[in-house]
Image: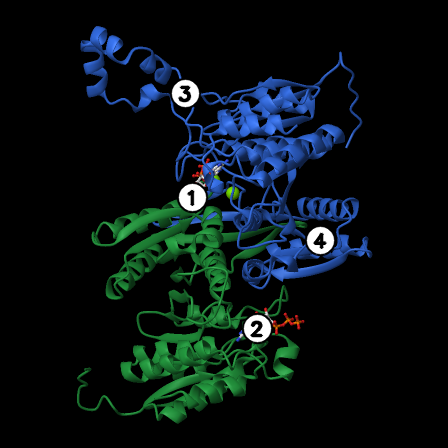
Chain colours: A blue, B green
Amino acid sequence: ARAFSSTATDPIRATLFPGDGIGPEIAESVKQVFREAEVPIEWEEHYVGDQIDPRTQSFLTWESLESVRQNKVGLKGPMATPIGKGHRSLNLTLRKELNLYANVRPCYSLPGYKTRYDDVNLITIRENTEGEYSGLEHQVVRGVVESLKIITRQASLRVAEYAFHYAKAHGRERVSVIHKANIMQKTDGLFLKCCREVAEKYPEIKYEEAVIDNCCMMLVKNPALFDVLVMPNLYGDIISDLCAGLIGGLGLTPSLNIGEGGIALAEAVHGSAPDIAGKDLTSKLTPVVLETLAREWDRTLTVMGAGLVFLLTRPMENLANPTALLLSSVSMLRHLELHDKAEQIQNAILNTIAEGKYRTADLGGKSSTTDFTKAICDHL
Amino acid sequence: TYMPRPGDGAPRPVTLIPGDGIGPLVTNAVEQVMEAMHAPLYFERYEIHGDMKRVPEEVLESIRKNKVCLKGGLKTPVGGGVNSLNVQLRKELDLYASLVNCFNLPGLPTRHENVDIVVIRENTEGEYSGLEHEVVPGVVESLKVITKFCSERIAKYAFEYAYLNNRKKVTAVHKANIMKLADGLFLESCREVATKYPSIKYNEIIVDNCCMQLVSKPEQFDVMVTPNLYGNLVANTAAGIAGGTGVMPGGNVGADHAVFEQGASAGNVGNEKLMEQKKANPVALLLSSAMMLRHLQFPSFADRLETAVKRVILEGKYRTKDLGGTSSTQEVTDAVIANLD
Ligand SMILES: Nc1ncnc2c1ncn2[C@@H]1O[C@H](COP(=O)(O)OP(=O)(O)OP(=O)(O)O)[C@@H](O)[C@H]1O
Ligand SMILES: Nc1ncnc2c1ncn2[C@@H]1O[C@H](COP(=O)(O)OP(=O)(O)OP(=O)(O)O)[C@@H](O)[C@H]1O
Ligand SMILES: [Mg+2]
Ligand SMILES: [Mg+2]
């Protein structure tokens, strides 16, 4: 990390991508908590465009990327990627363009929120730039397609290095490499080899290797068997979601992307959750309803009066759990060495959940995003 | 009542590969139980091991002739030049579907309830293509190959399985948001086949979300159809939540042949200690053998074997360490034999 100085007159600038789907709702929640906690951060908000920027080949503009490069720190909400067609994944663009090579995803049981698994305390560290996410695919002949998985020595060494560095800095005892080198002998074999090399430089940290299928099985039988896990891209994606499931779902797990040159971009592990994302109410009205409304506008107004106006101007579905993004913002604060604020906000979140009075639907509660956020603010 | 054709009672030859590690231990348990039941089959045994360069031709011949094989795990050296014999066998015999049934056994407490998932996995291509090379020093590539042909046939098998076994839903597992072409082709094939089975519900799930859902709400899944690698992970996760790989049956099947083995982690041959103490869990392979008996059209032998195994689990007196007990493989086997009707 680098040194950040801040005084009352000189807040830290950080880039904020509210993102798609539930993104704006949970980003609002972070902004509110930061305001309430008087965190000295000034957000520079960037939105995903609706046109491809040729400079990035993606809906993300060059200016957005520059903002992160300059501020070196940011928070992003989820960005949706269409399945099986369309443009390059926005998440991928960010990771590649900003060289966010390691994705750190802590996963621990929340006190007071009971799941089938207690005492989960894992850190998954995922290689973030290559592997199965190379984006190199082509059709060889009709009905035959190939997708390339790329593993390089450079990327493997730097993520391994980061994992051991992290383990040491955070007083962790073990690092396990997750691989499938029995099948992908050359690619995963190279990843393993790099991890072994780095492990030798850290004799105080226990080094282990686990085949990914066996790792899945052991994780669901006894998650306490693991401590820090480091792995190639796709495995990291899968394993970190699995771990999220152990502690209560994607609504809870934060992550921090580490990039070259000290860039840190925090983001929730989850996606845009289109199933629960708020929509502008007008988009839910069918043409028939709209027509009727237009035809009998006067009467409708008098009948429904203020109620309708209220509904039409209320864009949020308000179901999303903002915890994952909030905890991500806490990691961001830690990275900025604003430890007091980080601690204060984290405690407020954990206490609110532990107390159990205000919880979102994914945790079996009835609170809306806004009520839950307000409860956190009250716990600050 | 099952009305056999004349001659159906003639003993059938089955190729037997005891394999490495705990393989001989658990295949031996099956042999003992088959003998105790006087099951109408006999084994043709072949000693092969994971460190061999390839599967000997005579073994392949035997399976081609018998059409059915029972095997223990074959150890794959990690990252060391030798290709997995388990994979070779599947490719040589074109055993394109791997099937693992993960379900809660009555009497065996696990963290989850009502798990009854069948994972049907494409077994011949995808990430297991074996096509890898070093592009320049320090940069290696591995090819994932997906074909319409293989995707379609696995999708067909999955829906046919669901249809014949009165299953209600097929879920396709993919990562088509990232691998748009490869997994996209897989999905497209599944969708096409799905339209031919209107009575079976079809849905799709991204593999990472799938693993998350598996550990939180596994009861939502029924039959799952997957490309090669995801199937491996999904099956092991499902096995883990339902009691571990030591109890989940399965096998590999193609148009002409079937190889039955421990369902998940078929290549996991256990550790030294497990072998020395002779405490491997024979339940998975015994249940796989029941599937084999059904495949050979000996349904009542299959039922007897399955009932006996389930009784032993329910009774809870004889369980191996992975199920929280202290029994040896032999003690569990004896208990199964004692519980045979
Ligand atoms: N913050 C959250 N609060 C509540 N539920 C969530 C949250 N994030 C994700 N979920 C739930 O987890 C499941 C998977 O969500 P995810 O966002 O990954 O969906 P997705 O379809 O993969 O989205 P995307 O296409 O953006 O990746 C959904 O059912 C979603 O509702
Ligand atoms: N029948 C079986 N087939 C394959 N693998 C098995 C079987 N039974 C157990 N295993 C697996 O073999 C591995 C070793 O099992 P076991 O629990 O006995 O060893 P362990 O965890 O190393 O023991 P300890 O904790 O005493 O060191 C585990 O991954 C276990 O799930
Ligand atoms: Mg994911
Ligand atoms: Mg997603």
Helix, strand, or loop for circle 1?
Answer: loop
Q: Chain of mark 4?
A: A
> Is residue A243 rendered to the left or right of residue A147?
right
Q: Where residue A276 appears, x then y in whole percent?
A: 41, 33
Residue labelled with disc 4: A194
Give, as a three-letter code, the residue at label 1: Ala
Q: Quick one: B140 or A380, which is closer to the camera? A: A380
| Discs 2, 4: same chain | no
**Is B307 situated above or below A367?**
below
**Mark 3 surroundings: few (<14), some (14-19) or many (≥20) residues within 10 A:** some
Residue labelled with disc 2: B324
Alpha-carbon distance for marks 3 and 2?
53 Å
**Mark 2 surroundings: few (<14), some (14-19) or many (≥20) residues within 10 A:** few
Give, as a three-letter code, the residue at label 2: Gly
Kindly tell me whether mark 2's CB lies below 8 Å from ligand 2: no
- Tell me which residue sits at (17%, 84%) in the image: B3
**Is B200 situated above or below B265?**
above
Alpha-carbon distance for marks 4 and 3?
49 Å
| Discs 3, 2: same chain | no
Disc 2, disc 4: CB below 8 Å?
no
